[in-house]
Image (cartoon, helix red, strand yellow):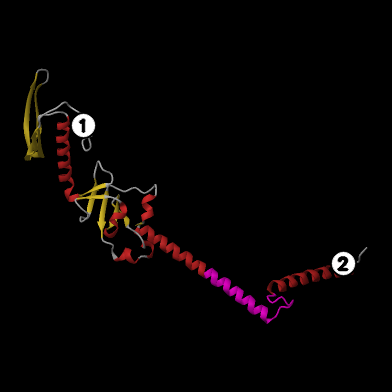
Amino acid sequence: MMDKKSKVGSIVSNAGKAAKNLLDNAIQAVDQNEDGKFDFVDVSTFAESVGTTVKNSASAVKESAEEKARELERKLLQPIFPDSLDCADFLMPKFVRIVERDKKYAESEVCQGSIGYGSDQKGLHMVNIFRDSVEAFGLMFYPDQGCEFYYADPSERNSYIALDEYFGYLKMARVNELKKIAQDLGAKHFKVTYREEQTSFSERKVKVRSKMADVGTVDGDSELTQKKYATVDVEAEMIFPGHLPIKPRLKYLQ
């Protein structure tokens, strides 16, 4: 059997071999010039390698921070690009605006090549179209592209009507359609009267007394409601020769 002295010697010997192997591995790892020695050249090369790693790491952190800043700017400015129009999740809202390209969008890195931007106010999403990029959207504007706010034509999805012209335009469009319907149905006389109605509620209360056979006399209050017509205009009147009716094609009145 091995005595205690021999055991201790064996343990020390094994520990020495392990330490030597560890040292050899360390030297091999940093022995940059592969001369089997750990010298000043190796230290310099190793330090340079560590420095490069640190620089690359710092550069990666900087790039990550810059990308996050750009992403935040994109969310705030909501730029719209030509390829955005082809996306399935892009929907043109009913309310649009034509605006000049201001300095903020002209100089922003994330907005280069944009043709407009989205905005949200009080729950209303609106697309703002840059005036120099109107053609890219493929939309029609009535009466032209010189106005600011437009609302979608109810029967032409890609057509927008200037807000100031909206109700007048739709009134005449419906009148013209009524005229065509009457003509298609073979009418001989056609007349459209337009009335603008104003309803007023009187604050004056009137005493109401009613006699009922089973109940007797009932008293109560009633508010007066008056309807007045501000304008009554004949928008169209025509006489046709008449013919057998054909099925009319409806657009605004369907």
Residue furthest to the top:
213
User: CB under 8 Å between callouts 2 and 1?
Assistant: no
Camera-side residue of 81 and 78: 81
Question: Is 241 displayed left or right of 68 in the figure?
Answer: left
Question: Is 247 displayed left or right of 57 in the figure?
Answer: left
**Toward which corner of the image does residue 205 lie, by quadrant?**
top left
Task: Tell me the quadrant of the picture where the C terminus can be found.
Answer: top left
Q: Identify which residue is drawn at 38% across, 53% down.
A: 84
Q: Is residue 233 above or below residue 45?
A: above
**Toward which corner of the image does residue 240 lie, by quadrant?**
top left
98 magenta-colored: no
Q: Is residue 9 visible?
A: yes
Q: Position of residue 158 (x, y in %)?
A: 28, 46
What's under tag 2, amino acid-wise? Lys
Q: Which residue is mark 2?
A: 7
Q: Is residue 225 visible?
A: no
Local secondary structure at mark 1: loop
Q: Identify which residue is drawn at 24% across, 48% down.
A: 160
**Which SS type dominates the magenta stretch?**
helix
Q: Nearer the viewer, mark 2 or mark 1?
A: 1
Residue furthest to the right:
1
Query: Mark 2, residues whose alpha carbon is within 10 Å: few (<14), some, or many (≥20)?
Result: few
Q: Which residue is mark 1?
A: 248
Magenta span: 31-58
Q: Position of residue 130 (x, y in %)?
A: 28, 58
Q: Position of residue 177 (x, y in %)?
A: 17, 37
